[in-house]
Image (tube, rainbow, N blue to C red):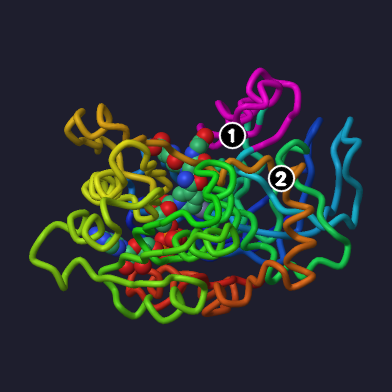
Amino acid sequence: MKSRAAVAFEAGKPLQIVEIDVAPPQKGEVLVKITHTGVCHTDAFTLSGEDPEGIFPAVLGHEGAGVVVQVGEGVTTLKEGDRVIPLYTAECRECKFCKSGKTNLCQAVRATQGKGLMPDGTSRFSYQGKPIYHYMGTSTFSEYTVVPEISLAKIDDEAPLEKVCLLGCGVTTGIGAVHNTAKVKAGDTVAVFGLGGIGLAVIMGAKEAGASRIIGVDINPDKFKLAGELGATDCINPKDYSKPIQEVIVELTDGGVDFSFECIGNVDVMRSALECCHKGWGESVIIGVAGAGQEISTRPFQLVTGRVWRGSAFGGVRGRTELPGMVKKAMSGELPLEPFITHTLPLEKINEAFDLMHEGKSIRTVIHF
Ligand code: NAD
Ligand code: AHE
Ligand code: ZN
């Protein structure tokens, strides 16, 4: 079938809106009509050419929601008309990782996903007879996409897709990192580096957990208002200080925070985020994604003296199991998604969403088809 899609033909170039061909879903696969998709910084990261797994031409996008159009052979858990959120972290419930109960990092389709292909090693997308690669197993920048059954969370039949698409990445990642990875408890102190969609969701999760102090850090002070509304007790701009920001935070918090979160993808900031943690027990969670070849560093003494470095992917959330409940919370108002949606645009204007992000003017732009 034909599908309107925003295709990344080349790294560093704007997406092109073209009509691609989408092949029918094969065994264990599902054809989904995407109605809405957010634009996450990771899409921009991959488009920039910095992603070691970046592969072109590809249909990017991983923060979407839509409706099942057709199921392939052997699909049992989904049917035409079901509302779904595509998952870049699948949940097969059978692999060693799923069975461990220790991680959400299902590996059932991860290898082919990283190569831009479906689990059988081929692509369902083509343009003018040439294959186009998938992205993160989701490719939500296409009106129609094909996704493995195990990479789809079935959600409520009445779910507002224009909002819950954000649970496909940003909001789930931030909130999940607080509850599943860090396990923030009432009274804990928290520092959040980067106040975009991810950092703001961390703030929301930290407030929900009862954190006593939530310090937001960003070099763009325009981000402070919303951060405060969502629960930040302090907002600071590293540019306002002559000393390293970790020293500022250590002084503000009588020795450092209990938890910090890096939500930028900057390896220097990752160091600051670790070093602003309290001696003996402070834990820093890396969420931001850094470019090819970049590495983190600190004095090992920082770890010897009890600070802990962790990482979090998709907030440690098992998508098929946990997203339906998060969607219900969004529908009841317990998990408000509106604050994150600063812009909405039709697919044809998707490059403007990238511009708004790079200019620091948006939190999330939701694209509609
Ligand atoms: P965003 O662009 O909306 O927000 C980033 C924020 O960081 C901006 O407000 C920007 O002003 C701020 N910033 C940039 N440089 C800074 C610096 N030196 N000091 C302080 N603040 C700085 O991005 P986002 O969509 O919120 O994504 C944030 C990061 O999280 C990205 O690296 C993205 O790839 C990553 N991410 C990871 C996961 C995961 O599962 N681990 C999921 C989603 C996104
Ligand atoms: N492909 C990159 C890594 C990108 C990355 O870390 N992705 C995050 C999700 S970002 C969502 O916005 C993630 O979940 N990673 C775990 C995984 O299995 O991909 C690289 O460095 O190669
Ligand atoms: Zn994302």
Q: Position of residue 352 (x, y in %)?
A: 44, 75
Q: Position of residue 192 (x, y in %)?
A: 38, 59
Q: Amino acid at mark 1?
A: Leu
Q: Dot 1: what SS?
A: loop
Residue marked by disc 2:
146
First in residue order: circle 2 vs circle 1:
1
Residue marked by disc 1:
117
Is residue 41 visible in this depiction of the protein?
Answer: no
Q: Dot 2: what SS?
A: strand
Numbered circles on residues, count:
2
- Ligand 2 contact, mark 1 (Cβ < 8 Å): no
Towards the viewer: 150 or 35: 150
Residue most toward the left? 242
Occupied quadrant, residue 354 = bottom left
Badge 2: residue crowd in 10 Å (few <14, some 14–19, many ≥20): many
Q: Position of residue 129 (x, y in %)?
A: 59, 44
Is the residue under label 1 in contact with that under label 2 (CB below 8 Å)?
A: no
Residue most toward the top? 96
Residue ID at (64%, 58%)? 167
Occupied quadrant, residue 5 = bottom right
Classify the position of the C terminus by image quarter: bottom right
Range shown magenta? 90-118
Towards the viewer: 111 or 226: 226
Left or right: where 162 falls relative to 28:
left
Is residue 148 visible in this depiction of the protein?
Answer: yes
Residue ID at (34%, 58%)? 193
Main SS class of the magenta portion in the image: loop
**Is residue 82 located in the magenta-colored stretch of the structure?**
no
Q: Amino acid at mark 2?
A: Val
Residue ID at (81%, 30%)? 27
